[in-house]
Amino acid sequence: MELLWVANAILLLVVAPLILLIAGRVVKRLRAISKLTDTTLEHGLALSGQLEAVPKLLETKRLTGAARQLVGRYGAGLVALL
Amino acid sequence: MGSETVALLVIVGVIVAAIALHLIIIAASLRKITSTLTKVRGGVQAIKGQTDPVGSVIVGIAGDVAAIDDDLEGLLQIVGDAQAAAEPPPPPQPARRTQPARRTSPPPAAVAVVEEVEVDFDEDDEDDDEPVVARPSMREAVARARAGV
């Protein structure tokens, strides 16, 4: 009978606080991870918004190609004039 | 059943309840994290799809710009050579009236003599006294533009 009381005391004074402590730490880390993922999602959305101008690079490439041809034509015309 | 047994069962029940509560909280947090990470993965894949052609496009633009630069350098050389080869324009000579060709017909009885008088229409303009500032050549202008002056 006394052993049961000792076991009860150990459960109540050692095991229960230990379980609460470890579980609390796990929950705390999980909440930090959740905050980090939220921040990552927020910045990812902001980054995606900044990439809206990337398709304009195709137009820029087309324009630089046209400018290259026009410079060639201009040079040929200038050489013919001189 | 003794009181110590009841106390044991109560304590074990409380511990199990605490563990269950924490497991429920952990599961909810993991579910939320999974949802957020799924969105992040979709966003990253979208970003990858958006930025896939950037490398080739940038390389193409750089090639075009380099070719344009080379062509313009060649043009600059050609124009500079032509500018150096061109003779400076002769200063304007005062116009002289030339004698009209003699005609077979008899000359007129009276010949009016016309004298040329230079009229300065810009009497107030005093730029004639200022020194002439030499205009920079095209090469100098390009060099200045590239230097950011």
Image (tube, coloured by chain):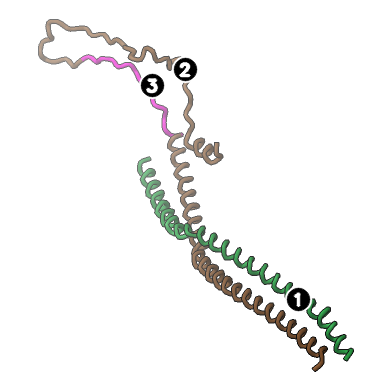
Q: Quadrant of the C terminus of chain B?
A: top right
A69 or A37, which is in the foreground? A37
Label 3: which residue? B91
> What chain letter is assigned to the residue under label 2?
B
**Element type at marker 3?**
loop
Query: Marks 1 and 2: CB-CB under 8 Å?
Result: no
Residue B18's tag is: none
Report x, y in % for residue B88: 42, 27
Q: Quadrant of the N terminus of chain B?
A: bottom right
Residue B130's tag is: 2
**Looking at the rendering, which quadrant does residue B9 occupy?**
bottom right
Where does the magenta region start and end?
B84-99
Residue that lies at the very extreme toward the top in this rendered image: B110
**Element type at marker 1?**
helix
**Element type at marker 2?**
loop
In the rendered structure, the colour chosen for chain B is: brown
In the rendered structure, the colour chosen for chain A is: green
Is A36 situated above or below B1?
above
Mark 1 residue type: Leu
Magenta-drawn stretch, dominant element (helix, strand or loop): loop
Q: Is residue B96 magenta?
A: yes
Report x, y in % for residue A16: 78, 79
Mark 1 to mark 2 CA distance (whole Å):
94 Å
Q: Residue at x 41, y 51 (%)?
A: A67
